Amino acid sequence: MARHLIQSTIAALFLAACGGGGDGAAPKQSIVSTQQEIPAALRGVAAKKLFGGKTTAAAMAPAPYGSYAKGCVSGAVQLPETGATWQAMRLSRNRNWGHPETVDFLQDLSRKAAALPGWSGLYIGDISQPRGGPMLTGHASHQLGLDADIWMLPPKRLDLSRAERENLSSISLRRANGAYTNDNWTPQHMAVMKAAAEDPRVARIFVFPGAKVKMCAEAKGDRSWLNKIRPWWGHHYHFHVRLTCPPGSRGCVNQAPPPAGDGCADAQQWVNNILNPPPPDPNKPKVKPKPRRELTLADLPNQCVQVLQSR
C-alpha cells in the first residue's frame, strides 16, 4: 500500500509539474539536460522516495550515471529469482536489479561457487533498486546497479520458497568484533572471494578485517588478488562486491583504485586497533556531527531525472 501511494504521488507530481494530462500521457518534456529543469514540485523531495517508489527499470539503454553512493542506473535487468546455481533473497525488497554486467557476473560467480565442496551455488542479497538511486532503507551505495551483497551462508538447497527467503538468515563469520574469523569460516569462503577478486570486472570486495587477515595468512602463490579485498566494518554476514564502470559508460565515476600491494599490513593494523583501540586524542576538537542531509534529485547527475521519468 505504501509503495503504491509513493508511485501514485510521483506520477501525479511529474504530470502536474511537466504539463502531462490526467490520462497518464507522458510528460511533454522527456529529456532533462540541466538541473534547473527539475520539476519544481520534485526539487525538495528526498530522492530515496522517488527511486524507492519505482518497481520497474527505466526503458532506456543500460548505463550507470554518477558514483556508487550518488547516482542511478538505466536499463537495469532483474536477476531471476532462482537459477541453477543461485537464489535471490529478500524478494519483498525488490532489490535484485542491476546493470546487465552485474547480473552476468553474479551468474558466473555462482557457477564457480557451485563447484566447491558443500556449496550448491550462492544466495544473493541486495543488488540495487530497479532504477538504482538512493534506497529507502539501508545502503548508502548500491545506487549504480554495480554493487551486490553475497551471503556467507553456503546454500544447501536452491528451492527456497518466497517465505523461506524472507525468514532465513545468513551466518556471521566474525569473532572478537571482527578481529578474527569464527568456526563458520571455511576454505570455500576464501575460494569464492578469490574467484570474485580475480574477475577483471571487479573493483573491490568489502569484508570484515579479520577475514582479510585470515586470507592474507593462507594465500599461496600469486597474491595480487588480495589487493581487491578491502576491510570494512560489518560485512560478516555477507561480502560486498563492487564492479568497475563498464567500458563505454561515460557518465559513470569509478572509485579510486586501492593502494598498490596486497593490503595485508593495513588490514592487520585495523585488527590491532580493534583488539587494542588507540587512546583518544585529547587535542582533537570536539565537533558534533551534523545529521546527514537527504539527497534530492539536484544532488544526482542530470541523467537521473530522465531515468526517473522514463517509462
Image: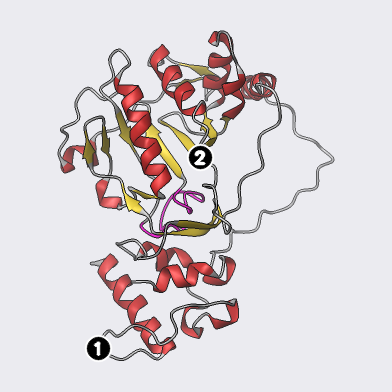
Where does label 2 land, which residue?
242
Q: Tag on residue 116?
A: none
| Extent of the magenta region | 130-145
Q: Residue furthest right?
A: 283
The image shows residue 36 at horizontal and vertical percentages of: 59, 81
Front-most of 241 and 280? 241
Q: Which amino acid type is shown beneath numbered disc 2?
A: Arg
**Residue under circle 1?**
23
Callout 2 secondary element: strand
In the image, residue 263 above or below residue 87: above
Give the residue at x 36% y 43%.
103
Colour mapping? secondary structure
Looking at the image, is 252 positioned above or below residue 5? above
Q: Position of residue 198 (x, y in %)?
A: 51, 25
- The mark that comes first in sequence, 1 or 2, is 1
Which residue of the protein is positioned furthest toward the front in this rendering?
248
Front-most of 198 and 269? 198
Dot 2 alpha-carbon crowd within 10 angstroms: few under 14, some 14 to 19, many 20 or more: many
Quarter of the picture holding the N terminus: bottom left
Q: Is residue 184 left or right of residue 69?
A: left
Q: Secondary structure at mark 1?
A: loop
Amino acid type at circle 1 is Asp
Whether residue 241 appears in magenta in the rendering, the answer is: no
Task: Give left or right: position of 78 versus 157.
Answer: right
Q: Is residue 132 magenta?
A: yes
